[in-house]
Image (cartoon, rainbow, N blue to C red):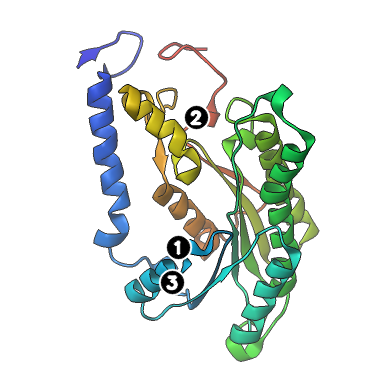
Amino acid sequence: MSYDKTRSGPTQTLEETYKHTLARIQKIQSHLDTAPRSSKLKGAKHLYLLDYDGTNLPNLKQTIETKYPDVKATVQQADAADEDAIKGVCEQAIKEEGRLDVFFANAGIATKEPLHNTSKELFMETMRVNALSCFLAVKHASLAMLKTNPAVGKDHSGGSIILTASVAGIRSGAGTIDYSASKAAVNSMAKTSAYQLQKCDIRVNSVCPGLIETGMTTFTFNYARQRGTAGKIGQLNPLGRFGVAEEIAQAVLFLASDDSSYVNGQNFAVDGGLSASHPVVPGRWA
């Protein structure tokens, strides 16, 4: 470890950086296993979980109901951009539970084609999965959240809708043209919907993840590890590392709960600070 005069702290080798990153991430990922159940989760009674790939749904249902015996999980294989499916699951929640309080629209695909290789078909499919799915979520979830039902303690309309966008929807440099356009649309929907749903206590916000290790980014991470450059992943980020899904989940949980009761129409970046700055030479003032 050494000190760089242009920075306020010590610099680390790639090996040291990666070792610290892995230790930090292991601690984050073990949080839900080692910490007591958050008070934010105590209100969860019934989760309706949809996935285009139904392979993991039975295991997901079993995991949730084993870990949280007081929570029921209903799983369904469906396309998040299928209006009948989204309308149906919202109506199912109203029929079975008498209310819908939270909707998390998290479906998405990533692409890798450069501008001149991007076909109109690919562009429209990216918009369909990433943006249309969020529009359908806002449309049908808000209709369900407008319904009151004093019998189940819902005297007034209300709810929280969370959309998954990306830092690629905030500014360029984080995705392909079709992917970035779709996520910019999601961010716009969060802002516009907040004003379309005025004075009914329904909040709409988007979460904008940075570089997160998920199934969509497997290629990037595997490639770096094969080359022995895993320590460079996330090096342009002020935190100097990539993120994991659990860190996005905590942000979504905040937006779903009453802890964020005055947060509405926002694009909530969870990116370690990556989108906080225009490009600069690391360690120097712009």
Q: Nearer the viewer, mark 2 or mark 3?
A: 3
Q: Which of marks 1 and 2 is in front?
A: 1
Residue 270 in picture, x, y percent from top left: 49, 42
Question: Marks 2 and 3: CB-CB under 8 Å?
Answer: no
Residue type at numbered disc 3: Lys
> Nearest the camera: 228 or 11?
228
Q: In this view, does 172 lie above or below 77?
A: above
Q: Quadrant of residue 202?
A: bottom right
Q: In this view, does 270 lie above or below 257?
A: above
Q: What residue sits 37% from the left and 65% below the top? A: 38
Residue 101 in picture, x, y percent from top left: 60, 71
Image quarter of the N terminus: top left
Residue bearing mark 2: 274
> Nearest the camera: 185 or 159?
185
Residue type at numbered disc 1: Asn
Whole-Å distance between the Cαs marked 1 and 3? Answer: 9 Å
Residues packed near mark 2 inside 10 Å, few (<14), some (14 to 19) or many (20 plus): many
Q: Quadrant of residue 176?
A: top right
Residue bearing mark 3: 61
Question: Marks 1 and 2: CB-CB under 8 Å?
Answer: no
275 vs 91, left or right, is left
- Which label's residue is closer to the chain start, 2 or 3? 3
Residue 91 in picture, x, y percent from top left: 69, 78
Q: What element carries label 3?
A: helix
Question: Marks 1 and 3: CB-CB under 8 Å?
Answer: no
What mark, if any, has residue 56 been given in the picture?
1
